[in-house]
Image: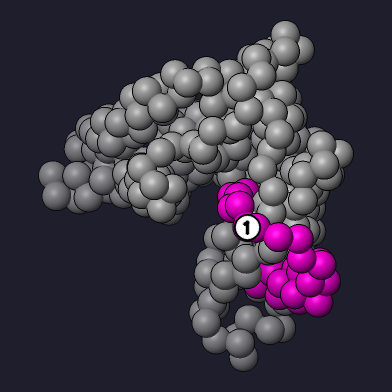
Amino acid sequence: MSETADVPGRAPPAYAIHLGLFLATCCTTTWAGAWMVHPDVSFFRPDQLLPYLGDGVPYCLSIMGILLAHEMGHYLVARAHGVDASLPYFLPVPLPMSGTMGAVIVMRSQIPSRDALVDWAAAGPLAGLVVAIPVLIYGVHVAPVAPAGPGLLEGNSLIYLGVKYLMKGQILPGNGVDIQLNHSPVAWGGWLGLLVTMINLMPIGQLDGGHVAFAFFGDRYERVSRGLHRLLVPLGLVVGVYVAQDLILRASLGVALGLGLQAGFPWLLWGGMLQLFRRFSGGRYHPPVGDQPLSPRRRRLCVLMLVVFVLIFVPVPMRQVM
């Protein structure tokens, strides 16, 4: 996930830090990938998981390739516009299912115009998708189709549904079956890459989508962002109710409500995190950037990013299958 901060002054690149964090994240994502293939062993027991470490390399290559493309898209476009930007700082997190919290780039100078802001914000998601979609296609191609559950089932976007239909010749999940991502870490890396891109493209705050929306709406953005931000809690509740009512005939009311809350929780979490980012930014959703009007070409790029967001939008990121 890409975030930015303005830091005065110009500092030389800390190559050792960037490389160390990159390599550490390769290690944590390889560890997470090995556990995905062998979930029957303990994630936190090296003596159990180390023999299978090689099985985690495909996931590591998939997710790290997507993240690296995303962040370098931001970095190269920032430098092309004369903005002093750092190389990406990768965030290694030794947790199952991801092994990382993405990466951040520090902006040491302001972006000079709304046109440059759109270019910079769009470059990361588009570069990431150039890697993520082929990764997803290959991963789905090699993933087996089997009964979906019990366990966690990943959510569908229009692109993900299309890839599954293209590779498997059927709409999945269907008739109680879906592809088994745990048997294809590459597919999981591609799906997670799309999910991270979707989160980044939410047109709120200082996410990539927020930068694009700010450039498009200008002074109206604070009102637009506030309205969209307020929709996240109702969206989480709607997702929770939808999942709960689907489970009510197969589980007790308490279990159904608990699993519904679990499914809707990501939207509540992201809403809370965006509120924290807003508080740290002095109560604003986005700092001002230049007064120049947005060019017609960049307006078309804004529309393209909205289309991309719709295509990768996942209403129910994860849900429990019984």
**Which segment did they paint magenta?**
1-28
Q: Is residue 157 above or below residue 48?
A: above
The residue under the point 14% across, 50% down is: 254
Q: Check the image and name the residue furthest to the bottom.
A: 47
Residue 255 relative to residue 236: left or right? left
Q: Amino acid at mark 1?
A: Val
Taking depth in this image into account, of 48 and 297 the one nearest to the observer is: 297
Q: Is residue 163 above or below residue 191?
A: above
Residue 240 relative to residue 84: left or right? left
Q: Is residue 295 above or below residue 166?
A: above
Q: Secondary structure at mark 1?
A: loop
x then y, percent, for residue 65? 79, 53
Taking depth in this image into account, of 206 and 288 the one nearest to the observer is: 288
Quarter of the rendering containing residue 46: bottom right
Q: Check the image and name the residue furthest to the left.
A: 253
The residue under the point 49% across, 36% down is: 286
The residue under the point 71% across, 34% down is: 112
Is 232 within the magenta? no
The reply to whether residue 181 is in sight is no
* Residue located beneath label 1 in the image: 7
The residue under the point 72% across, 8% down is: 296
